[in-house]
Structure formats: C-alpha cells, structure tokens
Image: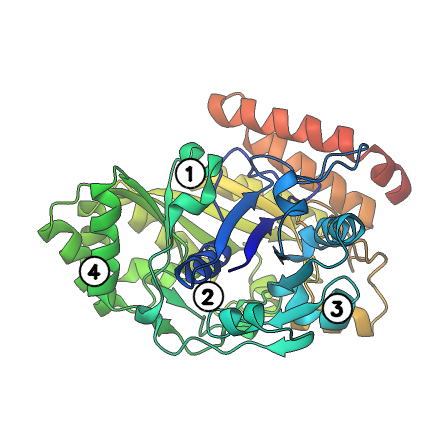
Amino acid sequence: MSRISLVEPLSNFNGYRLIKLPLLGLLYLGTILKRRGHHVTLHSENVSPVLKGKSGFLDPDLRESDVIGISTMTSTANRAYEIARAVRKSKSETRIFLGGPHATFMAQEASQYADVVVLGEAESNIGQLVENSSRGIFQGEKVPDLDQLPYPDFSLMGKLHSTMRYAPISTSRGCPFDCSFCSVSTMFGRKIRFRSPESVLDELEMRHHSGHRRFFFYDDNFGVSHERSKILLEGILRKNLNLKWTAEARVELSQDKELLKLMARSGCHYLLFGLESINPKTLSTYNKKQSLEDIKNCIRRVRQHDIKVHGMFVLGSDEDSPETVRQTVKFCNQFKVDSAQFAILFPIPGTRLYQQLEAEGRIFTKDWSLYDGTHVVFRPKNMKAAELQRLFVWAWKKFYSLARVKGFLASRYLLSKWERINRKFLDALK
C-alpha cells in the first residue's frame, strides 16, 4: 500500500475561486486508488496551498507521500512544475505523476518534472502505473463504459468538501463540435460517451441522501442528446429529489420546448452558454456552428422558463475590433443576460488556434501562468495587445455596473486584485 497525495494546483489568478469546485478527474483517480487499498489524500490549492510562498514550506502530507499526482491545466502548469521541484528537493525517491490537458499536449515539457506523464484519461491504467516502477510517458486509454467508473468519494476532499456550494457530477465525456480554441474534443474525443440515466440517477439519489441539494453538471455540453436528457430529468422528478442544478450547454438545447420545461421542473436554475461572440465572422472563425440569431432566440426561450442565462464570451479573434467588444456588452444588456463572463482569446496547446498562431509567430509569451483568459498572450490582428487588454477590463466594469449590485462588488474586488497582481505585466504590454 502506498501513501498517495493528489494535487490540484492553483493558477496565479483565479477569478472563479469564490466558487469552490474540485477537479472530478482527480476525484475519480483518488477513488480508484483508495479502492485498491492505497492511502489517498486530495489537496486543492483553492482551499489551501501545498507549497508556501517565499518560505518554500511543503505540506507535510506531500513530504511523507510515496507518490504525488499533479493535475495540470495550462494556466496551472507553472505551479505544477514548482510543486514537483519542491517535492523532488524534499524527498528524491518520491514518484511524481503529471497528467491533465497541459501534460497531455506538452508531454516532453512535463516529463522534465515528473517520473510518469499520463496522456489523456488515466482511470484505466492509473492503478497499474502506481503499483509498478514504470517511468516515462504513457498513453491513457479512453474509458469505454463510464458506468464502470466508481462514484467519486467526496471524503477525499477534506476541507474542500465543507466549502462546496454545488456537488459536482459528470454524465458524459467528449464533444462532437470542434471549436478552434477548445481542446475538449482533442482530449476526450468527438464521439460522446454517456453514462446511463440509471447510473446518474443512482448517484444523485446517493448524494441527496447525504444532504446535497445543489449540483453542477460538469459535462462540456449538457443536453447534447435530448432524448437521454429527458429520461434523466423525468427520473429526477419521479424520485422527488427536489434539486437545484446548473450546467453548461449549447444554444441548440433551447430549440426543444419539452426539454426546457423538464429542465425547469427538475430544478435547473442557471445555464451557462458558450455564446462566444456576437460577431458572425468571429463565430465562423471559431467554428462555433451557431448564428447570432440562434444566440438571441436561445436567451429569449431559456429566460421564458425562468432559467437564468450566463453568457460566456471570448474576445480578440482576427475578426474582432474594439467596436466588437463594446457591442458585446451592449448586447448583454439589451438581451438581459443575467450574468456574463468575458475572456480574452488565448491559444491552448492542443488546439488549432495554438498551431495557427504559433506558425504565424504571433505568440509573444510562453509564460503558462498567463494563459487563463485574463491576459493577452498573442498579437491580435485588428488592435494592439494593450488595447485588447484594456477593453477586457472595461467590459467587466461596464457590464457589472452599480445596477448589478452583487456582481458589481464581486467584480470590482476581483479586478482590483487582478490589476494589483499584474502591474508589471501591464507595464510590459504597453
């Protein structure tokens, strides 16, 4: 039996830190390893850092572990490597694993800091890799039947469990769409794998008995199969689970009136839509496969069912101009979007966008900590980098004005923190 610590690193700036949610991938891996008899602890730096700032103090649990597994997204890659170096310095014989999207697409880079790098999904072979002395880069296997995965063991989360407003749950993997800036389809495949409605309902019922009432569906595209979704939602109603839930979805979902009614009746109170842009040319550039009219109709239909709309927009495509950003905020107010999220386009390794901008020599920094949607890291086509950065901050302040008191306070707090952290970056950008 090994002592194993799994770590979710924190990015330099996390604008969504106020909503504490764990990475389900680590929870699945931890649950599998615990069932194999290992002592497993999950550490989320959203709750508490495992490596203290200037002192370099490493969490005692990591110092005593035989195996350290660290999940990497691009924005957390630098922090993951920093933790790996500290672990190696503290106890050289500790085996270090790196996985997640960034390690998958930048495997050679990640291998400089780890004994084992796992590409893609790791559930099928994590036990074998931990229990033998393998070293190197290993291709994970896509889980063919998601019903075979165990329900994530929330007890592994420690303090994070008590701070969660929403219980995470996943019902599918993969996305049939192929947006140019997104790595989901490359990471998990364009063929969607579904859990059965029965499996999802059993997990929801178990969580309900444990006291959870609010849920966040982690699917990248909830409701992509309308008929399956209807079976699931009818099951929630039949079992009288009395839930409140939210999910990410595409605009096509709103075209099914029966599905929208079921969503509202089963407790859906917020939907997060990747609207991306109000510029038709940008939507085409992103390969979004939706029109501006689709977006408008979606917002109207969803709000008619008393479900709130969170619109997510990506600013800075080669078809965007400063006026596009201003019109985006105007659109959000005109169509009464309940909340909005503005991100700066950034090239994630593993995407077509990254390949394009890299080939064109337009990426001016590979400081991965800046790859979080709040920093300009490439040269835009129709405006200067500093101008796009300024407009990004303007969009947040303009949308979250005093008319939205709650959002105003939260956004001003986060923006002031962001500007304080990024003074040197802003000066360099100018």
Element at label 3: loop
Q: Nearer the viewer, mark 2 or mark 3?
A: 3
x 68%, y 36%: residue: 393
Q: Is residue 227 left or right of residue 16?
A: left
Query: Which residue is the site of mark 3?
Result: 111
Disc 1 residue crowd, few under 14, some 14–19, many 20+, Cα 10 Å: some
Q: CA distance from mark 3 to mark 1?
A: 31 Å
Task: Measuring from the top left, give residue 331's x and y in whole percent.
Answer: 51, 44
In contact (CB < 8 Å): disc 3 and disc 1: no
Disc 4 residue crowd, few under 14, some 14–19, many 20+, Cα 10 Å: many
Q: Earlier in the sequence, mark 4 or mark 1?
A: 1
Task: Measuring from the top left, give residue 379's x and y in whole percent.
Answer: 82, 57
Amino acid marked by disc 3: Ser
Q: Nearer the viewer, mark 2 or mark 4?
A: 4
Q: Which mark is residue 408?
A: none
Q: Is residue 385 left or right of residue 64?
A: right
Q: Earlier in the sequence, mark 2 or mark 4?
A: 4
Q: Quadrant of the C terminus?
A: top right
Q: Earlier in the sequence, mark 3 or mark 4?
A: 3
Q: CA distance from mark 2 to mark 4?
A: 26 Å
Question: Residue pushed farthest front?
Answer: 1
Query: Which residue is the site of mark 4?
Result: 232
x 33%, y 45%: residue: 215
Q: CA distance from mark 2 to mark 3?
A: 39 Å
Query: Which residue is the site of mark 1?
Result: 161
